[in-house]
Image (cartoon, rainbow, N blue to C red):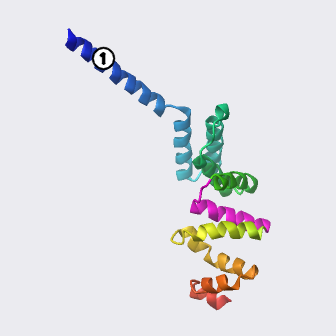
Amino acid sequence: MKKVIKSKGFAFCLIAMVCMLAFTQCSPIATLQKQYASSIIQGNYQEAYDYAEALMAEQGKDDKDVPVETYLMAGKSAFQLNNTEKALEYLYMAYTLGSYDAEMLSYLADIYNQQGKMSKEMRVLNDLMKQSDSQFAKAKTERYFLINTEAELYEKADSLWQVQTPEFKASK
């Protein structure tokens, strides 16, 4: 009799765990995250952006905080769509929440450069250059040198001159 009760208890726990796992896998948030990832892989940035915005709405229900990763998703998608206003809004939100994602910093620097906001661009590039091994930091070393020169930070610019490519040095 005790074995039957124990096995029923085990079966009940097993069923409860399976149901919880199934609910988690089928949650709207998990579905939207998968759809976003699939869209990004396919290069469909409009669809990815739409999923990211839907994800923000779902995660922000009942005044809950939206995770930094979701702002990054929406901001990067918006940037790829040349939607500067939304890209800036979401990427800046991720930045203020403490993200130092190299791709995000690169995109923010590009936006600030386009807008002529040199001090904001310099602040973001300073953070990006702390990740000197990233492809995004390497791609911005010339701009970082030039912006320090424009700001008349010659000691900093001089140290940056040493890491410039021979092609860049020859062009200056």
Foreground residue among 101 and 30: 101
Left or right, 64 with respect to 111, comes to left
Left or right, 8 with respect to 111, comes to left
Could you tell me residue 49's position as x and y percent?
A: 64, 47
Q: Residue furthest toward the top?
A: 1
Left or right, 79 with respect to 132, comes to right
Q: Residue at x 56, y 47 (%)?
A: 39
Q: Quadrant of the N terminus?
A: top left
Q: Residue furthest toward the bottom?
A: 170
Residue 107 lies within the magenta run: yes
Foreground residue among 26 and 62: 62
Q: Residue at x 61, y 40 (%)?
A: 55
Q: Residue at x 66, y 85 (%)?
A: 155
Q: Which residue was labeled with disc 1?
A: 9
Q: Secondary structure at mark 1?
A: helix
Task: Answer with the quarter of the image where residue 117 lies.
Answer: bottom right
**In this picture, which residue range is highlighted in magenta?**
98-116
Task: Answer with the quarter of the image where residue 124 lies.
Answer: bottom right
Q: Quadrant of the C terminus?
A: bottom right
Q: Is residue 46 above or below residue 118?
A: above
Task: Answer with the quarter of the image where residue 102 lies.
Answer: bottom right
> At label 1, which amino acid type do we have?
Gly
Q: How many marks?
A: 1
Q: Is residue 42 above or below residue 110?
A: above
Q: Residue furthest toward the right?
A: 116
Q: Is residue 148 above or below residue 43?
A: below
Could you tell me residue 133's position as x and y percent?
A: 51, 71
Crowd tier of the residue under label 1, counting other residues whose Cα lies within 10 Å: few below 14, some 14–19, many 20 or above:
few
Could you tell me residue 167's position as x and y percent?
A: 60, 87
